[in-house]
Amino acid sequence: MKINTLITVLLCTCFNVFGQTKINLDKILKQLNLTAAQCKTSLIATKTAPNNPNETIVVIPEIAKQEDDIFELNSHILIVDTKTSKITSRYYESSKTNEWFSDAFAIVEIKIDTAHYIIAKNKRAFGIRLYFNNYSKPNPYSKEIISLFVRKNSKLKNILKNYTVMEYYGEGDASCYGEFFRTEKILIMKSKKTNAYFDILVKSKNTKTLNDVDEQDECISKDNVSTSKTTLTFNGNIYL
């Protein structure tokens, strides 16, 4: 058995037995003219569609470039028929514009977010979240971004692109001393509309942490927390 075929068989078995939905990955890849070896299989994500249990949302990260641990990914965002694995709606974006690249800040996970992103009457979006990390203790950096997609017949439209919902960074000595900053954001749909889509309220929690040593040589942390709000509105094409 060829290596590529073996990889595909193992992947299909994994998704059928252990995945959240029983889809046939091999059938999906064939419709995209891809093989498992052309994809970053560790980052493939699947989740049952929130408004139709007979459909599955699938994210296929196609390798555009790779050199050792550095790589760029083309993004295939799909909705497939769960029973037949036939693609019913799709979105594609090249690594040249989607910002799916993994270098010093590595892409460590891709997740599908099916929270209640009701953007209009009878119209629900879903999110794709990417997690980045640099694995540095003295100079940590991590980030989480979200993109929202809405279905339009056989196509998926990106209506919010790579919006940062978490960012953590700082500088320390990897033992105690350090100054660190963390911002976390949650998205809440509002009742007010702009260009036929509901506005999105963004609530931010900003935490500044100072680590120091007290008189007993114990490492202590002090947090300074602030909050803020902003609103994203739809300009007719995308949320800004």
Image (spheres, rainbow, N blue to C red):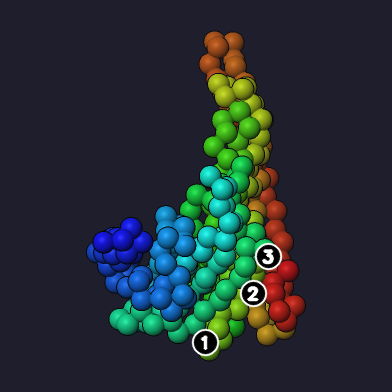
Return the mark for residue 154: 1
Q: Residues within 10 Å of mark 3 (few under 14, many from 20)?
A: few
Q: Which part of the image, by quadrant, shows the C terminus?
A: bottom right
Q: Is residue 38 visible?
A: yes
Of circles 2 and 3, the one toward us is 3
Outermost residue, top side:
216
Q: CA distance from mark 2 to mark 1?
A: 16 Å
Residues 34 and 201: in front is 34
Callout count: 3
Outermost residue, bottom side:
153
- Kind of residue indicated by mark 3: Thr
Q: Mark 2 or mark 3: which comes first in sequence?
A: 3
Check whether the beta carbons of the residues at disc 2 and disc 1 lie within 8 A of each other: no
Check whether the beta carbons of the residues at disc 2 and disc 3 lie within 8 A of each other: no
Return the mark for residue 159: 2
Q: Residues within 10 Å of mark 2 (few under 14, many from 20)?
A: some
Q: Residue drawn 54% across and 57% down?
A: 130
Q: Viewed as shown, does residue 164 lie left or right of 117? A: right
Q: CA distance from mark 2 to mark 3?
A: 15 Å
Q: Position of residue 165 (x, y in %)?
A: 61, 56
Q: Mark 2 or mark 1: which comes first in sequence?
A: 1
Q: Viewed as shown, does residue 12 lie left or right of 33? A: left
Q: Which secondary structure, mark 1?
A: loop
Q: Which residue is mark 3?
A: 97
Outermost residue, front side:
2
- State the image quarter where residue 93 is shown: bottom right
Q: Position of residue 123 (x, y in %)?
A: 54, 83
